Amino acid sequence: MGRDPRHPAMRDFSVMKERTVFFWRPLEQVLLAACLANILLPGLGALACRAGELELQSAGNPRDRLSGVPITIVDLQPFRRTSSIQIKTGRGEEGLATLINLNPDINSWYLLGLRWPGGVPDATYHLENADSGTQQLLLNTSHPAGLVIVRGNEKVVCDLWGGNSPDSLEAARRSGAPYVPLCGGRLYLRNPTKGHRTRIETVTDLLRDKVPGGETVVDIVRDTLFTDSYRETARTLPGSGDSIPGQAQKTAGEEPAPALLDPAQKDRFVDPMHLGIQVQSPGAGKMALGNWYAAKGIPGTYVSLVYTRAIAPEILQSYRTVVSTLDNLEAGALVYLVAFDLGQFDLKFALGTEHPRVGWSEHMLDRMRDESIPGPDGIGTVAPLVSNGLISPRDAARTAATFAGGFKRAHGAFQYGALAYKNHGSHYGFIEDGVLFSKLQPMLSTICVLDDGRVDLLTWTEGDNRLLPRIRYARQNGVPIITGFDASKQMSVPGPLVARWGEGNWSGSEDKKLRTLRAGAALQQVGGRRFLIYALFTGATPSAMVRVFQAYRCLYAMHLDMNALEHTYLAVYPRRGSSLDVEYLIRGMSEVDELAKGQYVPRFLGYADNRDFFYLLRKEGK
């Protein structure tokens, strides 16, 4: 697929661009200067200068202690179904084909293995079913030259290694494209590809992966030079009670519930100076605090702005033994929220080309590490599967929005508290297309999508393992911010660890300075409508996140990622006629994307990225 220059994504972002570049490039320069000055280790400068040329090496797979057989990610799949047949090439050479449906209930990903005599190396191909709901991929002895694709009463024979196209699989692999259509587009070959990394990610990953103590250098630079770099103070104006913009744009109760605000703040407008998503606002570009505004060209999508000082006093005074008191800086920091009507969208999750990894986290107790295996699940690489950091061609046309996922594996485990001593440090788990990459751990916040498309946010328990056959996507990221909704108090309930830096694994600096740029996801229900809410906090602690999600009466909320726009990225793709546009939650997020012929090409949709992400698809007929 590669980069797609057809996205007309030009936007006026001059103010935010200047601000973003100001904070973006000095960090890169400081880290490079530290390397070049050899303040870490002799010779590190030369290594830093070659950062763009380095490739990370995954740890090798261990062997099963009893059988001596190498362990791979395939061994983690409890529901896999395997079949094998004798096969032939077009020249009559015989071999063996093995087809593994990694999760028959989801029926999306397959591994095809080919073994030929005469010293020819074995080959393994990662295949993606383009229509997992209706068609099956099968091996059949009556057709030894390829696969049989079955849809209802229809059977299609697809020659892949024999017959009229003996080299079709290898030709697809040699193309290097992340997705290569096969069998008339009925399935895709997934090929390894290099995911995009910004220059700052290249440097920081180099330090973390290659340099003992490199993580400390990254933390020092972040905590000393970039505290509150992205914090944005709300610019408010008084409004009249009979002309609140949010009241004028209501659409038959279809929007999410507004925030509960201090009565003195209800009629105040916000100047959304850096908002990149166009909304239907009749208030001369101003937005009323806490109200929702429909996004133009994206039905079922809404935007809201708030800051914690404006929240209702009864919320700010609730659960004082669990939630910390907010300081003046975070109380005035602007929060951007986007809500998606789950009746109109499907949610999906995809791994990046590199992250999150499956090896050990650096952020765990040494004594909880088993040195005989390369990771908590017994594997150190996802091979022979391919994670390519790009939306599948089967989904691209319906994609309405993307947003960055959770923490990298480097920070995706616990170093303090009870969870640090459970399950090798309770590494955050994740599942893509029904395939288990890392086991889901009890007591962790989880975004979960079932086989029927239902989206839930929940704290995982041992009992939830019964759902594993039905889970299509899942991503864990720490402990909950909101655990539920108390109907008697009509108030969201904070997570018990939101004010505990170590036990909650909230990241931030060692001296517990937690205020930074953060992103979170939440679930809100209004009548029969359910909304997935993405929130960007320009300067907040977990306690401030709690207050905002309480104000919007969320049923559950969890952390995503933090510290930089590339980690808290969200883009939407409004359809205007036959064209697809690109708009960013914060205009400065365009800096993360690549330029092609003067236009911004969005990550995840236009080219492969190294980071994991979520994406929302317009439901059929919506």
Image (cartoon, rainbow, N blue to C red):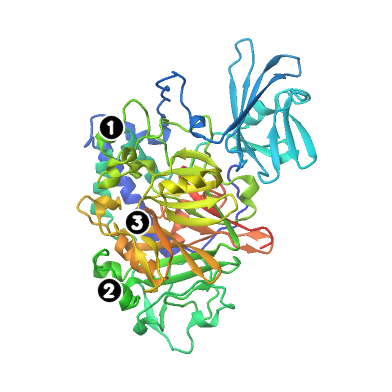
Q: Circle 3 sits on which residue?
A: 22
Q: Is residue 420 left or right of residue 158?
A: left
Residue 578 position (above or below residue 374):
below
Q: Circle 2 sits on which residue?
A: 317
Q: Position of residue 538 (x, y in %)?
A: 36, 63
Q: In percent of the image, x 36 and y 81: which residue is there?
A: 265
Q: Position of residue 62 (x, y in %)?
A: 41, 24
Residue 276 appears in the rendering: no
Q: Is residue 237 left or right of residue 217?
A: right
Q: Nearer the viewer, residue 193 or 262?
A: 262
Q: Please, what is the three-letter code of the amino acid marked with disc 1?
A: Leu
Does dot 2 land on a helix, a strand or a loop? loop
Q: Nearer the viewer, residue 355 or 604?
A: 355
Q: In percent of the image, x 35 and y 65: which residue is there?
A: 493
Q: Circle 1 sits on which residue?
A: 44
Does dot 3 land on a helix, a strand or a loop? helix
Does dot 1 land on a helix, a strand or a loop? helix
Residue 173 position (above or below residue 523):
above
Q: Please, what is the three-letter code of the amino acid marked with disc 3?
A: Phe
Q: Please, what is the three-letter code of the amino acid marked with disc 2?
A: Gln
The label on residue 242 is none
Q: Position of residue 35 (x, y in %)?
A: 27, 37
Q: Count residues near mark 3 (Cα–Cα under 10 Å), then give few for <14, some for 14-19, many for 20+.
A: few
Specify the quadrant of the image occupied by residue 299. bottom right
Q: Nearer the viewer, residue 469 or 522?
A: 469
Q: In percent of the image, x 60 and y 43: which residue is there?
A: 106
Task: Tally the numbered discs.
Answer: 3
